[in-house]
Amino acid sequence: MFADLHLHTCYSDGTYTPQELAGHAKGHGLAAIALTDHDTVEGCGPMALACLQEGVEFIPGSELTAEINGHELHLIGYLLDIHHPRLLLETGRFQVVRQDRIREMVGRLNRLGLSLDADAVLARANCRAPGRPHVARALVEAGVCASPDEAFERFLKKHRPGWVPKFKISTQNAIELIHEAGGLAVMAHPGLNRHDELIAELAAQGLDGIECYHSAHSPSTSAHYLEIAHEHGLLVTGGSDCHGLNKGKPLIGSVQLPYIYVQQLKDRALQSLPHPVS
Ligand code: AMP
Ligand code: ZN
Ligand code: FE
Ligand code: FE
């Protein structure tokens, strides 16, 4: 039995609907999947229903944009209470800033002479947590770039002319928020960040796990983070980070996390729940 615990839908910058994603999960024979859209839990309700219909176990989640010592990190909250008031308040704040950021990015591109329309980009994105991939797709549709990769390379990567810095919360606040909402905090794709020196500090802040398996991790990178997770007594997770089609093929199914890690995640979440006052 295998799982994929890192997936995006059209509720952030993925292209699949929850139904399409659940269909792919079933097609790949996955026993469980988690939804980890950026800075939102809005897709979790529809995703839970879609998974129920396909007979796939569902783990609600969200990938929060955080920072520590000036470095951007993504912290995934798993098994969150998706109706938790403060979680909804904080993710709502992220979403307002994300929408404003799209306008700012389009404004920069306009000043370069490109005729994109921010309202049209936002309408096409049709979600509360839009991101750079939506601008990249608009640049492709406008015929400015041949592919989203080219759009990132020319305009949207850090310090390129269309780039606008992103709103982040401190890792300490993100971990506290995830815990307050009943979830577990996991450092996403550490192999992309390569800031291993921060892991001890994150563990001291209450980090619960590390995403050792990821579609961008080589086998040796995964082995490296398995060792670090073991050293710090952290949970192990993994997922593909599928956003839809990637070079003609979806990434879902490219990472097969043994189900034992899902069990350990659930066991830990249950242990962490507050006890009723006796
Ligand atoms: P944002 O959250 O708006 O900063 O956008 C980040 C998202 O853009 C990531 O989650 C990826 O889905 C995507 N992304 C980042 N870098 C690239 C790249 N070089 N090429 C294609 N997509 C990218
Ligand atoms: Zn993304
Ligand atoms: Fe990420
Ligand atoms: Fe992601």
Image (tube, rainbow, N blue to C red):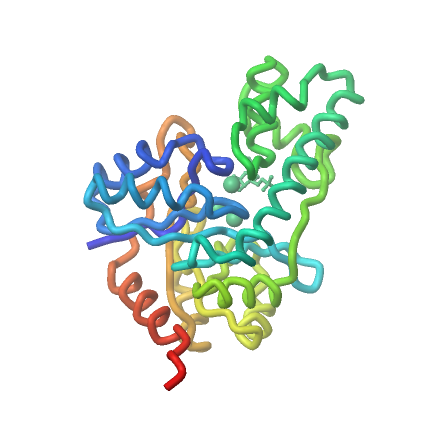
Is 138 located above or below residue 164 in the figure? Answer: above
Quadrant of the drawing holding the N terminus: bottom left
Q: Residue at x 42, y 58 (%)?
A: 81
Give the residue drawn at x 55%, y 63%: 177
Residue 106 shown left or right of residue 74 in the figure? right
Can residue 22 be seen in this snapshot?
yes
Q: Residue at x 63, y 54 (%)?
A: 72
Picture quadrant where residue 200 is located: bottom right
Give coordinates of residue 208: x percent, y percent: 45, 69
Above or below 103: residue 79: below
Compared across the picture, whether 155 is left or right of 191 comes to right
In terms of image quadrants, where is residue 258? bottom left
147 vs 233, left or right, is right
Work out whether 25 lies above or below 211.
above
Q: Residue furthest front?
A: 278
Q: Position of residue 106 (x, y in %)?
A: 70, 26
Q: Nearer the viewer, residue 255 or 108?
A: 108
Q: Do we see residue 220 in this rendering?
A: no
Q: Position of residue 109 (x, y in %)?
A: 73, 24
- When the figure is inspected, residue 151 is found, relative to residue 65, above or below; the finding is above
> How many discs mark residues in the rendered view?
0
Relative image position of residue 204 (x, y in whole percent): 56, 77
> Which residue is most to the bottom?
278
The quadrant in which the C terminus is found is bottom left
User: Image point 42% across, 28% down: which residue?
Assistant: 247
